[in-house]
Structures are given as structure tokens and as C-alpha cells.
Image (cartoon, rainbow, N blue to C red):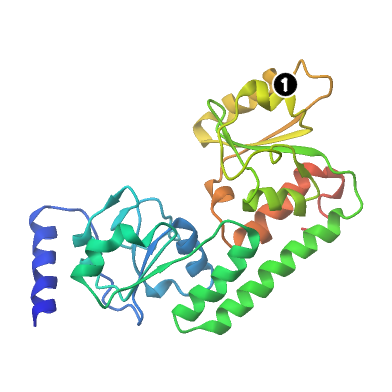
Amino acid sequence: MRQSAGGIAVLAVLVLSGCPRDLPRNEAPSPRVVSFSPAVTEMIFEMGLGDHVVGVTSYCRPPAGVNIPVVGNDLNITVEPILAVEPDILVTQSNPKQFAMLRRLKPDLRIEPIKIETLGDIADAMSRLSTLMGSPDKGKSARRAFLASLEKVRGRVAGRPKPRVVFLMGHHDPSTAGQGTFINELIEVAGGVNAAAVGRKRWPKIGIESLLKLAPDVIVCESEASVADEAREYWSKLTEPLPKKVRIHVVTDKRWTIPSGRISDTFAPMLADFLHPETAGGSGE
């Protein structure tokens, strides 16, 4: 009775506050899942398990036409919106200690931290998420397809010269992908060498002088669509004085840096096209 009354009180707070959220997905099958990670949200829907999701963060992007209540994000953890969707499981990539208050208010809520940094982590996450939702076979199938797509791209570029690549996020005060990231591994799968990996881990900032010293053959820059042309012109002019011409590729799909199954079947072939255009349309497509 106490939990039921609490749920009613929470809904009353949301209604009275005028908070523009959808009502809980009462029809969701068990277990009801709150995804506190854009990568987790992507993978769950890719595996056809999206009906379980009753809450997401403001950074998550469910498929078009699917309306799911937004319950916060890692910078704004508020228990009321999460409790309102009555979850059984909350999956997060961040420290579960952030949800200590939520755990006290709902002791039966299962909080599952999950690490998704490398390509291997993505494959493991597929298995784990599908098992949590009672459909392990879907995870096994997704894992096999993910690894097979990566191998297909590796085979397509095998034996070819490996260009030096730098992957950047933004063109003003950019960050790059260093060691221990799926982007670093993706560059290798696509037949390149991550020039920014030496001495750098995770997602550090990189200065322009340091970048130019890396002598890249290819720059891939993730940019907002509204400034894509500006970013392309910026990097083209900046690298023009270098002894060799640098190929510039500006991408605007933010899912490049969200670790999910799409990395292997969409972005790995695309990156191989960037690095080895002579193979475009080949076996990796």
C-alpha cells in the first residue's frame, strides 16, 4: 500500500508541476527498463527489445515515432520522474552510487552498471542487456552479427597500406579518440592507424599544434550539421601548408560516437570507404 501511495504522489507532483513528460508506458512487458545511457537505448532497440524501455535520458534518441518519458540525465538525477515510470531495472554507464537516493526509496529496483568503451564491450553489452530482459537469444544473434560485420570490413582492407588517421569531435577546441576507445579500434578495423593514440587515452582535448605534428593522412571530424561546411573549410585550410594533402571527412551523425551495433554494420564500412576509397562498393559494403 505504501508503494502504491508513493506512486500516486509522484504522479500528482508531475501533473501539478506541469512537467511535459509522457505518462508511463503501462503496457510495457516485464522487466520495465529505464535506460540511463544513449548507447544502451540504441542497443536495446536494435535488438528489438524496445518495448521494455519505459524511461530514457535527455541524451537518448529512441527511434522516430517512439515516445518514451525523459527521466533526467547523469547531470540531473531526480528520483520522482524515474519512480513515476515504475521501473524494475535501471541500466547506466555511470557510477551507480549516483542513484543512492533512488535505491533507498525503491529498494527492489535493480541498478545495473555497464561498461561500454571498446568494441568487445559493445558485443558483451548486447549479451548482457538481452539476458536482463529475458531474451538471451536476441543478444547472441546481435553479437554474432556485430562481430561478423567487423570481420567483413577487416577482410575488405586486409593487406593495404594503413593511412594515419585522426578522429575529432568538433573543430573549435576539438577532442580526439585515444587508446581504450571503440573509435581507436574502429580505425584499425577499417585499415588505418590512429595517429592520436600514442600517449593519449580515452577522449582528450587536442591542440592544433599537436594535431599537425601527428602528420595525419585522413581527418574524420564529427560535427553539427549546421556547421559542417565551416568545419570542412577550417580543417582544409589548416592542413593546407602540410607537405602532403590531408583528406578531410566531416560526419554529422552523432551515432558515430555512440557505441552500439550500428558501429559495425554502418560506420565501419563507411570509415573503410574514407580510408580506402579504392575498395568502396566492395565486400565490406
Depth check: 134 or 196 in front?
196
Q: Residue at x 76, y 31 (%)?
A: 216
Give the residue pinned by disc 1: 239
Q: Residue at x 11, y 72 (%)?
A: 6
Amino acid found under the numbered disc labelled 1: Thr
Q: Residue at x 73, y 24 (%)?
A: 213
Residue 48 seen in this snapshot: no
Q: Is residue 50 above or below residue 284?
A: below
- Please identify the quadrant where the C terminus is shown: bottom right
Q: Is residue 259 above or below residue 113?
A: above
Report helix, strand or loop for mark 1.
Answer: helix
Left or right position of 275 against 93: right
Depth check: 81 or 208 in front?
208
Residue 154 locus on image (x, y percent): 81, 58
Left or right position of 234 against 66: right
For disc 1, the neighbor class at 10 Å (few under 14, some 14 to 19, many from 20) is some
The single residue placed furthest to the right in the displayed view is 159
| Figure disc tally | 1
Determine the image quadrant of residue 278. top right
Determine the image quadrant of residue 153. bottom right
Residue 244 locus on image (x, y percent): 84, 23
- Please identify the quadrant where the N terminus is shown: bottom left
Q: Residue at x 63, y 78 (%)?
A: 141
Left or right position of 171 against 277: left
Residue 34 locus on image (x, y percent): 35, 67
Residue 188 seen in this snapshot: yes
Left or right position of 4 against 112: left
